[in-house]
Image: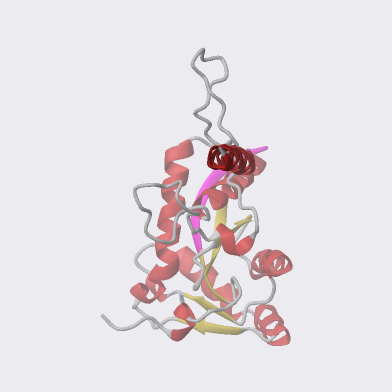
């Protein structure tokens, strides 16, 4: 197995090197019944965090608006890596043509050039080279299937679900977890994005104050103070006995 590329293992800010891909279409409710939407997923090569944008169509203009929102939140990437569309032929000719239209659009190319962003395409008919973002798309799809199944949500409900799914995926552990999960902090992609990462779910608390045998846990500072007091009392007792 060849070594990972340097930009995959060298230290850099989140989303400096970013992979991007679409998945969908997904049906959401509309005034006329239902409509198709797509999801544009960005993933960082280094910290493996993701960012998702809900796309109303596959036009270059829609992609640029989503890309500008991505930059406004996470800053300019140095390099964008994506499929070149050829591997979409077996799956969806429509998606292939739409994605090709986005990537070669003059407005998209001009914007990338003005922002100093390099766009790199993976080799044709080599989808495994995009495995670093295809894998995360698979994780997100599994989250959506487990959450809503075939349920059809409104546009805003689905946008909210995407944001919550993004938080959950970004809270997955990046390193090995020992038997004692409370022994140290579990490193996740969210730790590189924010100082106080939260998934939106309440912390699990095993303490029950209504239990007659409930004993509240003593804070670390209070425990240290109690230990110091006990040591002081012990020292006094020893000195008094020595004086006798």
Task: Please say whether residue 32 is one of the residues in the magenta stretch.
Answer: yes
Residue at the front extreme of this rendering: 244
Above/below status of 88 relative to 78: above
* Horizontal side, residue 225 vs residue 170: left or right: right
Q: Nearer the viewer, residue 108 or 145?
A: 145
Q: How many marks?
A: 0
Is 128 covered by the magenta stretch?
Answer: no
In the depicted view, which residue is nearer to us: 46 or 176? 176
Q: Quadrant of the N terminus?
A: bottom left
Q: Nearer the viewer, residue 32 or 200?
A: 200
Q: Is residue 153 visible?
A: no
Q: Residue at x 41, y 64 (%)?
A: 134
Residue depicted at 65% across the width and 59% down the height? 194
Q: In this rendering, does residue 48 appear at all? A: yes
Q: Is residue 110 left or right of residue 120?
A: right
Quarter of the image holding residue 93?
Answer: bottom left
Residue 85 coordinates in the image, percent (x, y): 45, 74
Q: x and y percent of residue 71 in the render?
A: 69, 70
Q: Position of residue 28 (x, y in %)?
A: 58, 42
Q: Which residues are magenta?
A: 22-35
Say which residue appears at 66% left-offset and 78% top-offset.
108
Q: Residue at x 51, y 68 (%)?
A: 47
């Amino acid at each position: 197995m060849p070594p990972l590329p340097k930009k995959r293992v060298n230290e850099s800010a989140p989303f400096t090197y970013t992979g991007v891909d679409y998945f969908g279409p997904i049906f959401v409710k509309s005034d006329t019944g239902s409509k198709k939407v797509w999801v544009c997923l960005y993933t960082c090569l280094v910290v493996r965090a993701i960012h998702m944008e809900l796309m109303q169509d596959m036009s270059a203009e829609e992609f640029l608006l989503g890309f500008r929102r991505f930059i406004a939140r996470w800053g300019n990437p140095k390099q964008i890596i994506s499929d070149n569309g050829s591997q979409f032929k077996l799956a969806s000719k429509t998606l292939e043509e739409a994605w090709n239209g986005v990537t070669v659009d003059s407005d998209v190319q001009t914007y990338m050039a003005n922002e100093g962003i390099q766009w790199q395409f993976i080799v044709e008919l080599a989808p495994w080279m995009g495995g670093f973002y295809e894998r995360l798309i698979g994780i997100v799809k599994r989250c959506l299937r487990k959450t809503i199944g075939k349920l059809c949500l409104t546009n805003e409900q689905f946008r909210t679900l995407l944001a919550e799914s993004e938080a959950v995926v970004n809270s997955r552990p990046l390193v090995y977890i020992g038997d004692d999960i409370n022994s140290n902090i579990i490193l996740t992609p969210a730790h590189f994005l924010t100082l106080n990462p939260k998934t939106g779910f309440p912390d699990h608390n095993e303490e029950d104050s209504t239990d007659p045998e409930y004993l509240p846990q003593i804070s670390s500072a209070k425990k240290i103070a109690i230990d110091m007091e006990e040591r002081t009392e012990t020292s006094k007792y020893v000195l008094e006995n020595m004086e006798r």
